[in-house]
Image (spheres, rainbow, N blue to C red):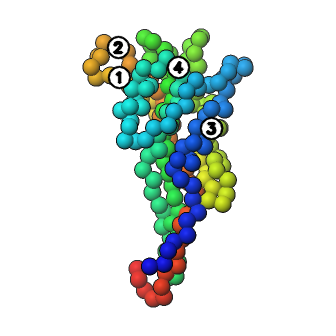
Amino acid sequence: MNPATANFASTAAIAMALQAQLQQVQLPNAGGAAFQRVELFDSENLVEAFQVLLVSEQRIAVIVPLAAHWETECSQRKLLCRRVQPVAILISDRVIGTRTQALYGGVTNPGAFNLAALAVPFVAGQLINNPGGVVSVPTSESSMILKQADKTNLPGRAAVALELDCKGGWIETYLNAGITL
């Protein structure tokens, strides 16, 4: 077997680059940091991430890398695989008692949709420089309501899930002569 040459950033590097970008987001009119907390979680600990969102009294962004996939190009003599790392950013603005105001904002809070709009320019584009760089592309945005199953009388928390495809980096290897595929 011919060993492959790797030119890509790790999932950890991607998540930490997104975290650094989100920590730079500011509220309009010198309102300060948009997020009081920017946390990293993995998809195995989504329940824990949701619990952090539920109990947090703050504006928060939770970064969750999803399952990466590889796009393959194969010629007669070379195998090239390009990486796509999807990431979900759960954005929440806590307003006790009114999820609508938590989503859309009010007199005293920006709202999760507005926080997501502030965040997009900071997480779209060249995330990690070349070689083996990563470009982050927004792919979807949706609202979600989080509730604790054992506390049905509490209003829960509204959040926006901003999904990104972090594209970039590759592995390549040369193949033996002849038809193998």
Spatial CA span between label 2 and label 3: 33 Å
Rendering quarter of residue 17 = top right
Q: Nearer the viewer, mark 4 or mark 1?
A: 4
User: Residue drawn 63% across and 38% down?
Assistant: 21
Query: In x, y percent, where is residue 111?
Result: 54, 21
Amino acid at pointer 1: Lys
Q: Earlier in the sequence, mark 2 or mark 3?
A: 3
Spatial CA span between label 2 and label 4: 17 Å
- Crowd class of label 1 (few under 14; some 14 to 19; many from 20; radius 10 Å): some
Q: Could you say which disc has been placed on residue 108 in the image? A: none
- Crowd class of label 2 (few under 14; some 14 to 19; many from 20; radius 10 Å): few
Q: Is residue 84 left or right of residue 22?
A: left
Q: Residue furthest right?
A: 30
Query: In x, y percent, where is residue 40?
Result: 50, 37
Q: Which residue is mark 4?
A: 58
SS class, disc 3 = helix
Q: Which residue is mark 1?
A: 147
Contact between marks 1 and 2 (CB within 8 A): the answer is: yes
User: Residue drawn 48% across and 88% down?
Assistant: 177
Q: Is residue 80 left or right of residue 179?
A: right
Q: Which residue is mark 2?
A: 154
Amino acid at pointer 2: Leu
Q: Which residue is mark 3?
A: 20
Spatial CA span between label 4 and label 3: 18 Å
Q: Earlier in the sequence, mark 4 or mark 1?
A: 4
